[in-house]
Amino acid sequence: MKHLLIAILFLTLLLNTNCGQTKNENSEKLDEYLSELENVGFYGSVLVEINGEKVFSKGYGFSDVEKQIKNSPTTVFDIGSITKQFTAAAILKLEMQGKLSTDDKISKFFDKLPADKQQITIHDLLRHQSGLISNVGRDFEKISEKEFIDKVFNSDLQFPVGSSFSYSNIGYSLLAIIIEKTSNQSYETYLYENLWKPSQMEMTGYTRPAFDNNLVAVGYEYDNKVWGRPTDKEWDTSSPYWHLKGNGGILSTTEDLYKWHKSLLTEKVLSKDAKRKLYHPKLRTEETENSYYAYGWDVSKTNRNTTQVWHNGTNRILYADFLSFVDENVTFIMLSNKSHSNFNNLNFEMARIVFNPNVIPEIPIADNAENRIFSNRIITMISEFGLEKAKEEYAKKKNTEQLLEFLMRDEGFNHIDNGKPEIAIQIFEMNAFVYPKSAKALQGLGEGYMETGKKELALKYLKESLAINPDNPFVNRLIKQLDK
């Protein structure tokens, strides 16, 4: 899982936002947008805070299609790697209690460490700079604690400790083991007593809340194939096994995560010093304040020169996203039981709506069988006969056939990865030909040209994409990189 992240940075700032719309205008516009997304397949629950006030909380699509149960603000979702923020906060709570230090080497907690891992600190695990690989098994694969530890410490490091960044799920599982060893409590019990209970979060955990099964969302694949509930998978007695425990798999609701957000604005759970470390840890020499991974959160600057904190989580079935613009007092929480490229950028799209009243959000094309067949036919035409023949084929399409923008982007990058850059560029060009006003299609074309070393064309299309969506920090960074 490749994930980027959330939180709250400057809690003493006087927060203001110029969102340009009233509470009712924002609520109505967001509901209209989300209702249109529901019509093309979005399943999930969404909560929005503006100026410190919850202005929107609603569910869309089904949590259980078979039973016709709709998603709602009380639906329970797997929050994926958003779990990491709780693990990080628990470590800092233990530090507040004098039971450990983030500077401690993990050799204090694990015996007989190999020589290359003896210098790893808790700080290194929290910031994904330990050099450890990401996973040593599948999420729900059965494994004992000893077997997990042996596998982890027998794996090779990707780089010297503390010298670089590589997202590591197993690093956060090691942190969960440290929490249990230090507190003499189970991971979930310690988090409940020290984080969730003080925050009045009674619908967050692995099994302690004794969730009503009808409230837990069923996961669905893109074609509506049933994946099932996370609680139906093979778990240990009270939690997932160590491949997932501590780094993912916590269950929660948008409303409970909002309580967590509010709690972090106070010193109810973490002190001011602990929160400063949570969001502003010691950086490596090559890092800047513009963008970095903190303790379980991704922190960066927006093009408005404000601070954005974010984290997401997914297993490609379930998707969770928490985005907060801390200087502007605007927060978005989205949990979904149907991960899809059409909707996984939802929080950022809602941010565009809130911060830019004139924005007209793009509604994606429905991902159905007919459109997939048509899109794959166009891709085949490009691969076998070239771009112009594909355009001729597109001109003959039925009125009900539409090209899937996200699928074209995905296939373009797949062809680059498979050593077919010329075909990839033609796929990207076809996508931009059909969707000339789509920031995503133009971004894909720009990235394609960047990957193939065509700097001028890459800049052209990336700048066109940024003109349509100026709130995309990733495209901004690519342009700056190319302009050097």
Image (spheres, rainbow, N blue to C red):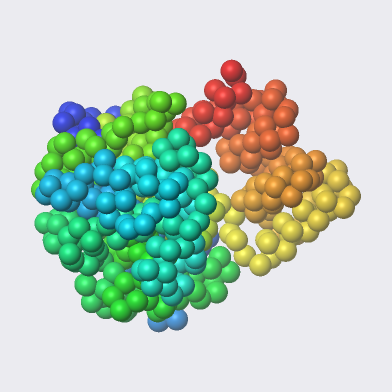
Residue at 68% of width from left, 35% of height from top?
Answer: 451
Residue at 51% of width from left, 34% of height from top?
Answer: 474
- In this view, the residue in front, 328 or 476, is 476
| Viewer can see residue 140 | yes
**Residue at the right extreme, as displayed:** 385
**Residue at the top extreme, as displayed:** 484
Number of numbered labels in the structure image:
0
Percent position (x, y) of residue 299? Answer: 36, 36
Q: Is residue 132 left or right of residue 100?
A: right
| Viewer can see residue 55 | no
- In this view, the residue in front, 294 or 405, is 294
Residue at 23% of width from left, 50% of height from top?
Answer: 91
Percent position (x, y) of residue 141? Answer: 46, 72
Q: Is residue 378 left or right of residue 222?
A: right
In what quadrant of the picture does the C terminus appear?
top right
Q: Is residue 113 left or right of residue 85?
A: right
Residue at 30% of width from left, 45% of height from top?
Answer: 105
As displayed, is residue 339 above or below residue 288? below
Percent position (x, y) of residue 243? Answer: 42, 65
Percent position (x, y) of residue 459? Answer: 64, 25
